[in-house]
Amino acid sequence: MSIGISGLTKRFGRTDVLRGIDLGIKKGELVALLGPSGSGKTTLLKIIAGLEWPDAGRLEVDGVDWLQLAAQERRIGFVFQHYALFPHMTVRDNLAFGLTVRPRAERPGKAVIAAKVDELLHFLQIAHLADRYPAQLSGGQRQRVALGRALAIEPKVLLLDEPFGALDAAIRRDLRRWLRGVHDSTGSTTIFVTHDQEEAFELADRVVVMGEGRIEQIGHADAIHDHPATPFVARFMGATVELPVTLQAGRIEAPGLDLSALPRRPLPDGPADLFVRPADILPVPDDASPWRIDSRMSNGANLRLVLSHASGALAEADVPRRAVQADALVAGTAARLRVAAGTVFPATRGAPPAQKTEPKSLKLESVR
Ligand SMILES: Nc1ncnc2c1ncn2[C@@H]1O[C@H](COP(=O)(O)OP(=O)(O)OP(=O)(O)O)[C@@H](O)[C@H]1O
Ligand SMILES: [Mg+2]
C-alpha cells in the first residue's frame, strides 16, 4: 500500500504538535521516523491508524481517503510504544486475538485461525513458546509476540512505535535484523518510530527526521549524516559544536581554526555557523591560538577535551587517547582546532540563540 500524507496538522490545546506534514511512502517501503521526544512521532502514527484525527490535511492510502475510514476499516498492524501482551493469555491466544475479535461476517473459522497462528509461530521462530504466558518470556521474546500479534491480521500497513524501546543494545541489534527479514518477506509497508539513529539507519530504506512537529529532512543514512539539511538535523546527528566563522569566496575562515580540510561552499560571503562533531576536532598546540584547553577527561578509549575561546565560546573535542599528540593536550594549553568535517549554515541573525547543551565534562573536575 502506498501512503500519501499532505499538509497534515494537529494541535492539542495550544500546542501545535504537527505543523504541516508532507510525506509519501511507497508500497513495501520501510521508513523510520526519527526525532527527539515530543516531536510528534506517535501522534503521526496514531493519525495513520485512525486513533487520532488531524485538524487539517490529507491521508490517502492507495488513493483512498483514509480520513473517511474508521480505525477498524483500515487494517493496521500496530505495535505500541508501551505495548502490553494480554497477561492471562498464552502466546498462541495472544496471536489469535486480532482474528477472533473480527466482526462475525469477516471472522475466519476456528481451524483457519489455528492454522494462521501456527504459520506465524513458525515464521517468527517462536513455536516453542506457544503455550507460555507473557510473564514466562524474555523481553525480546515478548517483542516478537507483540509483532506477531500485529502481523496476524495481515495488515495493509504496519506501524511500529519504538517496538524495541526497553531492550538492551545486543538484543535490539538481533531483533532489528530479524524485523528487516520479516518486513521483506511479508512485503508490508512499514513505518518504524525510534529515538535511536543507528537503529533508524540500519533498518530503514529511508529516514524521516522530525523536530517539533515538522519534517526536517527525508533521506538515506549517508546523506543525513554528511549533509544535514538544517541546523536542527546537524545538532541531532551529533554536530553539537557550533563555531562562528566567516565565508569568503566559498572559503570558511576563523582565527584559531584550521579549516583547510573543508571543501569550498557555494554560499554568499558573510558570517556563518559551522556545525562540527567533537570527534572531527583535533586540537593542535599553538601559542598564537585564541583557544585554550580548559579540561581533559578520559572515558578509556577517548579523551574529551573542553576548550574555550578568548570570547567565551566553548568547544568540545573527542581525541583517541592513544593518538600521538594526546599527551601534549593538557589543561591550560593553547591550541588551534583542526576540523576534519563539518556543515556550514549562514548565520541566523536576529533569530533566538540556538539552544546549547552544557558540555558534560564541565561538571567534572578538570584534570590538570
Ligand atoms: N492526547 C494528548 N493531549 C495533549 N497533548 C498531547 C496528547 N498526545 C500528545 N500530546 C503532546 O504532543 C506532543 C507530541 O507527542 P508525541 O507523543 O507525538 O511525541 P513523540 O515524538 O512520540 O515523543 P516520544 O519520543 O517521547 O514518544 C507532546 O508535546 C505531547 O505532550
Ligand atoms: Mg512517542
Image (cartoon, grey):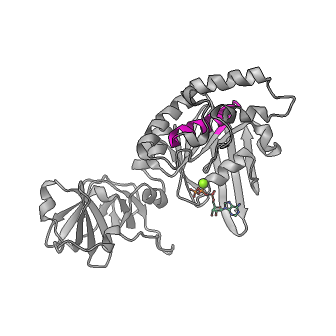
Residue at image coords 50%, 44%? 219
* Residue lying at the far bottom of the rendered structure: 311
Q: Position of residue 46 (x, y in %)?
A: 69, 49
Q: Main secondary structure of the magenta part?
A: helix
Residue at image coords 72%, 35%? 97
Q: Position of residue 79 (x, y in %)?
A: 63, 43
Query: On the rendered structure, is 185 left or right of 90?
Result: left
- Span shown in magenta: 138-158
Q: Which quadrant is home to the C terminus?
A: bottom left
The quadrant in which residue 10 appears is bottom right
Is residue 72 rendered magenta in the image?
A: no
**Residue 68 against residue 355 in the figure, above or below:** above
Q: Does the rendering let one see residue 231?
A: yes
**Residue 210 against residue 138 in the figure, above or below:** below
Q: Position of residue 6 (x, y in %)?
A: 69, 48
Q: Which quadrant is home to the N terminus?
A: top right
